[in-house]
Image (cartoon, grey):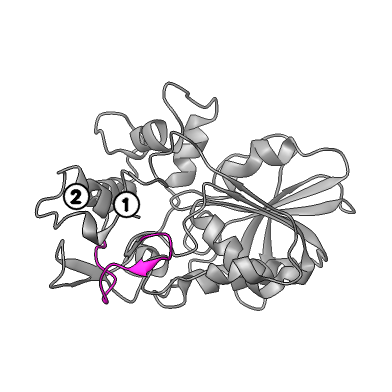
Amino acid sequence: MSTVPTLPGIQSQMVQTNRLNVHVLSCGPADGTPVVFVHGNASSATFWEETMLALPDGFRGIAVDLRGYGDTEPLPISGPTGMADFAADVRSVVETMGLGKHHIIGHSMGGGVVMLYAINHAADLLSITLTDPVSPYGYGGSKGADGAMTFDDGAPSGINPEFVQLLASGESGLENPMSPRNVLRGFYVKPPFISAREDDLVSSMLTTKVGDEHYPGNAVPSANWPGAAPGDKGVLPAFNRKYFDASGLAHIDPKPPILWVRGADDLIVSDYAMFDLAALGHMGAVPGWPGDEIGRA
């Protein structure tokens, strides 16, 4: 059922909820304590398989493919509501599968999804784990510890178009430095590590639906640097500060244990993120940088 081959011990199934048809990977006893896994951008539930299989006895791992990724029904992603829709999709799986109280883990963009999920469903959570998550103020368009918007229109916004083109074309090789495989090796993990499942992880990346209503989404002209702001469709607008704010996580009640994990050498979620236009401008990689007063994500 899964487009990408799964490891022994991992089950693949489609779960029809009241919102959409969701692809779910699972392992462990049916009566085990549920641990729900939410993947990041340009990936899928495949990335969680080894972690799921490493769960202690008595736990049940459940990893979802978000809409637009993996084998889940690729409903459109709205800019203003996309992250909240992701969270509601995850909730629909939890309810349809009757999971009850559960642990939840989110990586990168999925960490932002988990933050919104927790704000609305704190009473059902046994714990929250955020692994290299986006900021509670999203990714792009903000500055400072309080998440102030850099500009009113959400600028700067954008992504390397070559990576998007290669993702859309299904490029799986190493010839182009911006190929999904090279991005996996250089940014998803720390070199020189190469996963034994690299082929499957690249295949997972290539399930990403590409376009205005999915990844990367649309952009609109802006009078602000670098000339583009998030539009109203797709992934990048959805987790831009213009539309995303999960700062309410700090005030959820009841508040389960929260573990926030970061990578000291992370090049995607950091003060000098290689996928953040403000950081690239600061380094001179994007022309016209107006200065540190506009901040870095």
Disc number placed over residue 281 in the picture, else none: 2
> Mark 1 sits on what residue?
168
Residue 5 appears left or right of 190: right
- The reply to whether residue 21 is in sight is no
Residue 259's place in the image compared with 214, above or below, is above
Outermost residue toward the top in this view: 192
Distance from Cα at disc 1 to Cα at disc 2: 26 Å
Between residue 257 and residue 11, name the one nearer to us: 257
- The reply to whether residue 274 is in sight is yes
Does 152 appear in magenta? yes
Q: Which residue: 30% across, 54% down?
A: 296
Q: Which residue: 41% across, 78% down?
A: 80
Q: What's the amino acid at mark 2? A: Gly
Between residue 77 and residue 73, name the one nearer to us: 77
For mark 1, give the secondary structure: helix
Q: What's the amino acid at mark 1? A: Ala
Q: Which residue: 16% across, 72% down?
A: 222
Does 188 appear in magenta? no
Q: Position of residue 294 (x, y in %)?
A: 24, 61
- Predominant SS along the magenta part: loop
Q: Position of residue 136 (x, y in %)?
A: 50, 63
Q: Where on the picture, by quarter, is residue 88?
A: bottom right
Q: Where on the picture, by quarter, is residue 215?
A: bottom left
Q: Position of residue 109 (x, y in %)?
A: 49, 56
Residue 251 appears left or right of 186: right
Q: Position of residue 242 (x, y in %)?
A: 36, 73
Residue 66 appears left or right of 123: left
- The answer to whether mark 1 and mark 2 are in CB contact below 8 A is no
Which class describes the residues within 10 Å of circle 1: few (<14), some (14-19), or many (20+)?
some
Q: Quadrant of the C terminus?
A: bottom left
For mark 2, give the secondary structure: helix
- For the record, the magenta segment spans 144-157
